[in-house]
Amino acid sequence: MSRFETISTDRAPQALGTYSQAVRDGDTVYLSGQIPLDPVTMEIVSGSTAAQIDRVFLNLEAVAEAAGGSLAQILKFTIYLSDLADFPLVNAAMERYLEAPYPARVTVGVAALPKGAAVEIDAILSLTDR
């Protein structure tokens, strides 16, 4: 029997492989990377990179809520961008979806992401008050 609890919601895209949307260990929740998939169609959202970033934050929000938390309880994001010139778009989205104090983060430029996405973000969430 595992001591970990897996988290799943139909409000976010289902896993594309052998992983869970999130895993909870005590008060810590590890959210798997989300790409800008529409959870209904399982297709990349159309439109701009900004629209893709928004979809990713909505997907992360849905998983955080399924775990009993919220984006306000995120401790750290890891952001993967296929074009680092999109960094300001991530900053703008973080200002829309989060409030100060902002979580820690790292941003990594990558050659490619699943399904040709422009962005992928994973997170670590604490279910204790922030």
Image: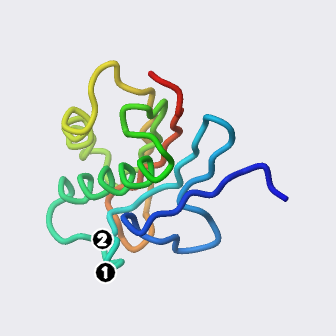
Residue with the most extreme right position: 1
Which disc is residue 41 wearing? 1
Residue that numbered label 2 is attached to: 38
Q: Position of residue 89 (x, y in %)?
A: 20, 43
> Callout 1 environment at 10 Å: few (<14), some (14 to 19), or many (20+)?
few
Q: Is residue 96 above or below residue 11?
A: above
Which residue lies at the image location 27% right of the left edge and 58% below the top edge? Answer: 55
Which residue lies at the image location 25% right of the left edge and 39% below the top edge? Answer: 97
Which residue lies at the image location 25% right of the left edge and 59% below the top edge? Answer: 52
Residue with the most extreme left position: 47
Task: Locate residue 25: give its quadrant.
Answer: top right
Q: Is residue 86 above or below residue 12?
A: above
Which residue lies at the image location 56% right of the left edge and 54% below the top edge? Answer: 22
Q: Nearer the viewer, residue 31 or 84?
A: 31
Q: Position of residue 29 (x, y in %)?
A: 58, 43
- The C terminus sits in image quarter: top left
Q: Secondary structure at mark 2?
A: loop
Marks 1 and 2 sit apart, C-alpha to C-alpha, by 6 Å
